[in-house]
Amino acid sequence: MPRDTTEQSTTPRLDEIDRNILAELTGNGRASVTAVAEAVHISRAHAYSRIARLTETGVLSRFTAVVDPVRAGLRSSAYVTLKVRQHSWRELKEQLRAVPEIHHIALVGGSFDVILLVRAEDNVHLRQVIFDQLQSMPGVLDTQTFLVFEDLDAR
């Protein structure tokens, strides 16, 4: 069967300079163009044009702050898996996006369909999100909750 090349044709080729720029910005999203250029050993104008191209092509989709959830008052976290009714994903993903306590949503393959990272003020709040909001959504057949005892950023 022929492979779908749609994604390949829209995915820009990245060279070593692009990857180094991405590494710099991943480490410090607030780095100035001048600082990125110096770290990557290219001119400021070249760095600016590369960053603009990476943004225009969607490789860089946004710049964001990384928040320590515990220091921000979100002391209770869990990964929640969902089994969902077939063909309910399109509607369900929009409902999930509307829940502020959900920090990550992934449609996956395996013994469940969706995995969520849910962060809440405490276990009472976490319970309310899971039991009152998630389990009552049309299309959700089953949930399973895995409490997070410690968060470690890999990057």
Image: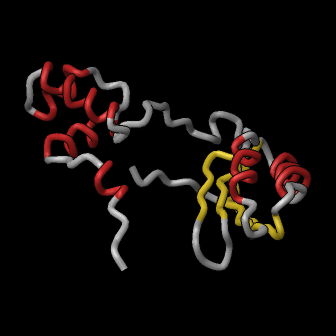
Horizontal side of 121 relative to 107 (left or right) equals: right
Expressed as whole percent of the image width and height from the top left, the position of residue 76 reads 73, 50
x 19%, y 20%: residue = 34
Residue 144 visible in the shown view: no
- Quadrant where the N terminus is found in the figure: bottom left
Decide: is 100 above or below 108: above
Q: Position of residue 70 (x, y in %)?
A: 64, 41
Task: Report which quarter residue 117 is drawn in.
Answer: bottom right
Q: Residue 130 location in percent, x, y?
A: 83, 55
Image coordinates for residue 57, horizontal then vertical, percent: 32, 37
- Residue that sits furthest to the front in the current view: 2
Q: Residue drawn at (14%, 20%), measured in percent from left and top? A: 44
* Residue 40 in the figure: left or right of residue 90: left
Residue at point 70%, 58% (across, down): 89
Number of residue marks: 0
Give the color scheme: rainbow, by chain, secondary structure or one colour: secondary structure
62 relative to 79, above or below:
above
Q: Is residue 22 visible?
A: yes
Quadrant location of residue 138?
bottom right
Question: Vertically, is 119 above or below 58?
Answer: below
* Residue at 30 percent of width and 57 percent of height: 8
